[in-house]
Structures are given as C-alpha cells and as structure tokens.
Image: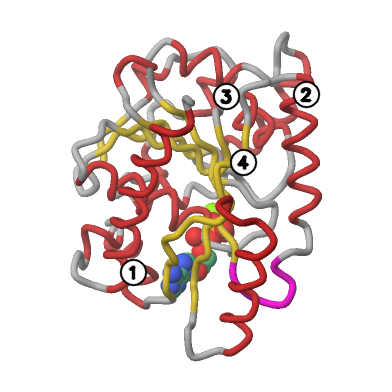
Amino acid sequence: MAKIFCVANQKGGVGKTTTTVNLAAGLAKLEQRVLLIDLDPQGNATMGAGINKARLTASVYEVLLGMADIATARQRSETGHFDVLPANRELAGAEVEMVELENRDKRLRDAIAAVDKDYDFVLIDCPPALSMLTLNGLCAAHGVIIPMQCEYYALEGLSDLANTIKKVSASLNPDLKIVGLLRVMFDPRMTLSQQVSDQLEQHFGDKVFRTVIPRNVRLAEAPSYGMPGVVFDPSSKGAQAYIAFGAEMVERIKKLDK
Ligand code: ADP
Ligand code: MG
C-alpha cells in the first residue's frame, strides 16, 4: 500500500512545491515508485516536473469532479522519473463546483484508492490556503510534511494548520498525523536562522526532520528547465539535501506503522 503525504503550509512561497518535486525525484532515485499530485491551480509542481500545464488533456480537476480517473489523467515526468497528476488554472473552479457533490472532501482519497497499489509514495502539493482542495489532500493522507523557513514569523500560522489537522483527524481521517516540520531555505550565516532552528528542535523534538534544506540557487533555477533540482544539478547542496530527506522519509515510514 502506498504511503500518502501532503506537503502543506497555508503560507505561500515557503517551499512546498520545491519540496514536493524534489522529494518525489529524490525518492525515485532511491527506487521508490512515486505519484506526485499537484493540488495547486498555479500548476507549479506540474511545470517543475517538466509537464506543460497548458497542454493537458486531463488533470486533477477532472479527477475531483469524477470526469476522469487517475489512471487516465496521470503523466510521466521524464526528467524526474515519477508519475504526475497534473494541475492548471481550471482547478480553481473545482472548489465551487465540488460544493454540490457528495463526499466532497473525500474525492481525492477515493480516486487514489484505485491506483494505490502502483506506488510506494503519493505526494500531494497543496495550495497556500486551508481550502476545500487542501481538505481533500488532508483527507487522503496518512501524514503531513510542513516546510518552514527559519525566520521570525515562521511559527505564526502554524497553530492554525495544526488545529485544522487535529480537526480533520478527529472527524474525517483518523489516520492523519503531522510527520514532521522540514526546515527549508536555511541560511547558516544568519544568526536568526540558527536561533529559530534551535527553537523548533527544542519545541517539537523529533517532529523536526533531521535533514535541513539549505538556500541554494540551483533549486530555484531548476523549474525553468522543467527539471527537479535533484536531477538538474545532483551534486549541488540543495539536491544532496533533498536526496538525504528522501532517505529520511523512507526510514520514517517504517516507524509510522508502529
Ligand atoms: P510554495 O510552493 O510554498 O509557494 P515554492 O516551492 O514555490 O513555495 O518556493 C518559493 C520560491 O522560493 C520559489 O521561487 C523557489 O524556487 C524558491 N525556493 C524554494 N526553496 C528554495 C531553496 N532551498 N533555495 C533557494 N530557493 C528556493
Ligand atoms: Mg507551490
């Protein structure tokens, strides 16, 4: 059975998409079978995996509305060596159109169930909001990965996300847990980065991933080549960190069952 993870944080620009795409590619390098689901109408994860969002025949939008299944809508990321359920702007309309539907918060979960056996990991890139789309991600997942920048305001908003996760696990998806907080865009030259990072460890203990993702320009350049950073420049510090994070996730899922 696939392990399903949401990469979520209701703030924008905190590294969700970079984390989803590079973790997918990192896991693929470790011979894991991965499906990346793009749940953000911006379609950044789709593009970052080398798939043109302007030329989709089917996407996560059709899947959520029951007009296609994942087996027909998925595409292969030739650069990343994983499958992608792509998204584009059309998805923004799903929010409203789903209101009418039955089981509207569990549509993604039900769609994944049909392809579950094809994968070791399903990674869901969430939009920057606690919306119906994010709720669909949370209802489908076993765990949440929360990328955070080590800055002064990092913890602001974390309690809203934690409360949402608590509510979802109490009423809709008892499986759901926070797997961990991932420190991203880390700059060791900044004293504040180091201080916030230490505070996170003190506060959240082993809910903080060991791996720290540094700020690295190669990770930011890669999407314009339609490649995950892990593939674009495998020896860069950013790529190495995401590959290490992939190994940490493989280790963590073994413990998750216990
Ligand atoms: P989100 O999906 O949360 O909105 P993104 O992953 O799109 O965030 O990241 C926001 C911006 O920061 C993007 O331009 C991305 O290329 C850049 N970025 C993300 N992680 C890193 C990193 N570790 N080093 C350098 N730039 C990064
Ligand atoms: Mg994003």
Ligand 1 has an atom within 8 Å of the beta carbon of the residue at disc 1: yes
Sequence order check: which comes first, mark 1 or mark 3? 3
Rendering quadrant holding ligand 2: bottom right
Sequence order check: which comes first, mark 3 or mark 4? 3
Amino acid bearing label 2: Ala
Sequence order check: which comes first, mark 2 or mark 1? 2
| Inter-mark Cα distance, 4 to 2 | 13 Å
Q: Is residue 81 left or right of residue 164?
A: left
Q: Nearer the viewer, mark 4 or mark 1?
A: 4
Which label number is shown at residue 178?
A: 4
Q: Which residue does the image show at 31% across and 57% down from the upper left?
A: 244
| Inter-mark Cα distance, 2 to 1 | 36 Å
Q: Which residue does the image show at 24% across and 47% down from the upper left?
A: 80
Q: Is residue 151 magenta?
A: yes
Residue to which mark 3 is pinned: 140
Dot 4 falls on a residue whose secondary structure is: strand
| Inter-mark Cα distance, 2 to 3 | 14 Å
Amino acid bearing label 3: Ala
Residue to which mark 1 is pinned: 238
Residue range (magenta): 149-154
Dot 3 falls on a residue whose secondary structure is: helix
Q: Is residue 215 left or right of residue 170?
A: left
